[in-house]
Amino acid sequence: MQKLSNRIVTVNRSPVIFGPDSYPALDRLVKSMHPHRVFILVDENTHQHCMPQLFNSVTTLAGAKVLKITGGESSKSFDNAVALWKELLTLGTDRSGLIINLGGGVVSDLGGFVASNFLRGIRYINIPTSLMAMSDAAIGGKTAVNVGFMKNQVGSFYPPAAIFIFPLFLETLSRDHLRSGFAEIVKSALIGNEGLWKKIKAHPVSEVLDIPADSPFWHHLILATATLKNRIVERDFREKKERKALNFGHTIGHALESYFMQTGAGELFHGDAVAAGMMGAVWLSAKKNFLSPAQLEVVCRYLREGFPRIKIENDAIPEVLGFMKSDKKRMAGLVTFTLLAKPGTPVLNIPCSEDEVTEALEFINSFSPSHHEKSLSQ
Ligand code: GLY
């Protein structure tokens, strides 16, 4: 059995301190920062399920003020940021203030955004509690709020002082949230770690979701993903080049999320949208002869079997395309994609035409493992 121990992943910009016994390190870090005031940003779930553990384990936080938002993507709004800034001002916060974001991606994106602008920037620490945030959102210093139905349109690159990952918080997640986060792990493996992809594809998603939170399997996956992400971010913090690989599956994924938000078509988990987006991106990768049809089949089979099928009606395709065209991942008016040459090897900045993207969306609708060759040749 692999020993579960604390690990620190890179230290240049924002160390990721990983492991079940990292509370003393968090205690020491907060003390050493000498904050005039400490705030803990939570949603109702992390308030109930994660905060007691944090307060019990980190004595320095005894006097911290808790700031609470409602969970869910609609909380990542400019209105909430303004409300939080007002609260910080009312409480007389100065530049030595510290915000601890205890939650998933909504909490860390919003809390980071609030920290990055308040008094031109105060310090913050991320403690991700969802798999999504542990493996992606809480690492890398991207902060954001949504504007209308457009995801992450206003934000900053502003690194946290540190990220503390306690894998046991996975126990507080629903199966849907766990699956959603797992999509980001699949993404990381596909763009940067072929060995990890081979390990993942040996386990169907339904089986993975039954693995207990404190098992070495999850620790290995989270640590590998966090390490990969931190390495990429260290080299390309402002996403000029290499960091774009992390957008794999997100160009289509974000457009689907925006479309679902706008039409109120029901809840769409980020990871499920990204899984559909990855299917579209691997289809484009094969269409443009970067990826072999055999790899297309393997990757899409895994994604189709593990994640819900998202059906995009034909007459909705122009609207989904519209969201893509106004997303950030475009250059000179063209929608550009991160594609794959093979699992573990991304190809960056590939412009795709509207027709190609339309076909990719149709492929997402229609793919079933035995039909891909027909779809490809259409
Ligand atoms: N979630 C993609 C990135 O942080 O670059």
Image: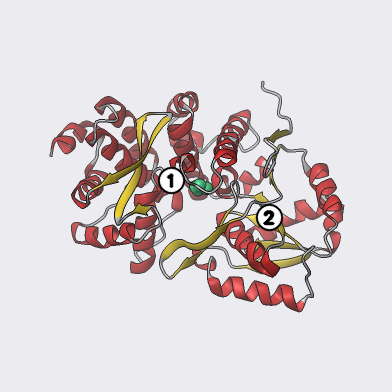
Identify the element where label 1 is drawn: helix
Coordinates of residue 260 in the picture (x, y in percent):
36, 62
Coordinates of residue 140 in the picture (x, y in percent):
59, 47
On screen, residue 119 above or below 224: below
The residue labelled by disc 2 is 49
Label 1 amino acid? Asn
Mark number displayed over residue 247? 1
Indicate left or right for 68 with 305 as reference.
right
Residue 170 seen in render: yes
Residue at the top extreme of this rendering: 1
On screen, residue 129 above or below 368: below
Q: How many residues crowd mark 2 within 10 Å: few (<14), some (14–19), many (20+)?
A: some
State the quadrant of the N terminus: top right
| Beta carbon of the mark 1 residue lies under 8 A of ligand 1 | yes
Residue at 29 percent across and 46 percent down: it is 351
Nearer to us in this view, 290 or 359: 290
Residue at 63 percent across and 59 percent down: it is 112
